[in-house]
Amino acid sequence: MIRFLFSFLLFSSLFAADQPNVVVLLADDLGYGDLSCYNPEAAYKTPELDRLAAEGIRFTDAHSASTICSPSRYSLYTGNQVCRTGRRTTAFEGPSGPSYIRPGEMTIADMLKQEGYHTGVFGKWHVGLTWFDKEGKRLGGGFENSLLIDYEKSAPLIDGPQTVGFDESFVTPNCPTTDPLYLYIENGMIPQPASQRHRRDNLPNPGGKWRWDNDEGWMAPDYQFVDADLLFYKKTVEFLDKHQQTNPDQPFFVVLSTQIAHAPVLPAKEFNGKTNAGARGDFVHELDTLTGRLLQKIKDLGIDDETIIIFNADNGPETVHTVWMREDHQHDAAGGWRGVKRDGWEGGHRVPFIVRWPGKIPAGQVSAQMTNTTDIFATLASIVGYALPDKVAVDSFDMTPVLFGKRPECDPVRPYLLTQSFRGEFQLRQGPWKYLNHKGSGGNRYDRGIMQPYALPEKEPEAEGQLYHLDTDPGETNNLFFSEEAKRKELQDLLASLIGSEGRTAPLNRKPFLNQ
């Protein structure tokens, strides 16, 4: 009893200081195999991110909530699967919206603001926005609709970051270098409307192909494509400097949402040729370097021990990126898993997830606990002592006991894990069992085109879904849909109980870990 009390008091003392600062680094289209700490055979090294992992905890069974950008970002900010919105899954383009985040829906920024945090987000937003024409009518997607925006009627944006808990923001509405409209939104306002026509021929084309997926459309004057992430990093650093100068005793929460490694692959000039793995290798090297610079900045500000760093990705690697890296550089961005971005197979949603808090989270941990991007919400709520209402973050589990080495690997926090693929179809994990409520990939076509060489024979072509045991079949090649009928029916019944706008996966009556 005395030993238990001493251990409890020691653990409690970790949180006796002021609330920690929180930095979330959200990478884009970064696969499980894109960091050398996850993939020793990577075609390049990522020393800064490897060091981040060595100084904290690295999860090997972490998943994005969706296999495409916009739904995953919604899940980061709300702790909910996109199915809770009742809307179809989509990646927003042009002036399309409205936001997935519903009016009155609590976000992670809202929660932390209630706990006294100063909040900011910089980079790619991409959860949908509402734009109006001169008649006050809401615009839909479509690149030409960009010309119909009435900026006086649209700004300040009614569902931008400033309406969902962020004190400061500098974001792009969609993918920063892929999907027009190309403009910046600063604190809900538009510094420069999209008034010029973007032509892709004005951009570099490294290797003759890596400019792929840069759509032409309308852009603001002086919009930056090649230096997108340098700009987002600069805005993040300005936020940190200003905050420490004006309110050093107030904790902050900041999200740096990068373009890397989304298409097109346009590394900034200083990173060209820095690896032997072509333009995409240089691109990931840029991400690694910016991570190192941010870590050094936090140290220089004297707040390293007071700051939690979370690194995550929104989904797996892009199709052509994965193929070209395999062909040209023997690099597997998916890290050996089947599938890529958009797919319900593991390569579409199993992603890097690293958390570091010096002196608090024991260094050198590697955990096989299942976790989801949605879990960032409940975990931070637990750390700051906020008891989540049952209707908030309904798909978010508290991973605090795992972070602090208080939960053995044999005792899973999550009894199950839900993900959604490109068309919104569901994948359900229960321990090593995985049920896919659909045929095929759930995303990409494997019967033609660039992915055809990676098609695998379907052993149960009549099955309406897929069932795999990942411990014995990590490649998802042996569909047990019929041979393990009892387990399949169990998972089908479980899935039916979890999905829908009124469903949930997280437990009820969640309390901060130290209060349990």
Image (cartoon, rainbow, N blue to C red):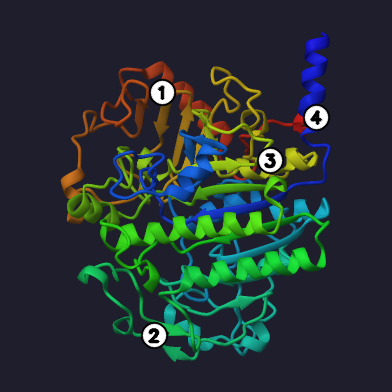
- In the rendered image, which residue does mark 1 sit on? 488
Residue type at mark 3 is: Ala
Q: Which of 305 and 215 lies nearest the eye of the viewer?
A: 305
- Label 4 secondary element: helix
244 is higher (above) or lower (below) than 379: below
- In the rendered image, which residue does mark 2 sit on? 198
Q: Which of 351 and 78 lies nearest the eye of the viewer?
A: 351
Q: Going from the N terminus, do you reach mark 4 or mark 1 first?
A: 4
Instruction: Say which of marks 2 and 4 sits in front.
Output: 4
- Label 3 secondary element: helix
Q: Going from the N terminus, do you reach mark 2 or mark 1 first?
A: 2
431 is higher (above) or lower (below) than 443: above
Q: Going from the N terminus, do you reach mark 2 or mark 4 first?
A: 4
Give residue 5's position: percent from left, percent from top. Answer: 82, 16
Labels 4 and 1 touching (C-beta < 8 A): no
Q: Going from the N terminus, do you reach mark 1 or mark 3 first?
A: 3
488 is higher (above) or lower (below) than 274: above
How many numbered marks appear? 4
Residue type at mark 2 is: His
Q: Which of 235 and 179 lies nearest the eye of the viewer?
A: 235
Q: Residue at x 50, y 44 (%)?
A: 51
Q: Going from the N terminus, do you reach mark 2 or mark 3 first?
A: 2
Q: Residue at x 41, y 29 (%)?
A: 434
Instruction: Say which of marks 4 and 3 sits in front.
Output: 4
- In the rendered image, which residue does mark 4 sit on? 12
Structural distance between the alpha carbons of marks 4 and 1: 43 Å
Q: Residue at x 67, y 49 (%)?
A: 304
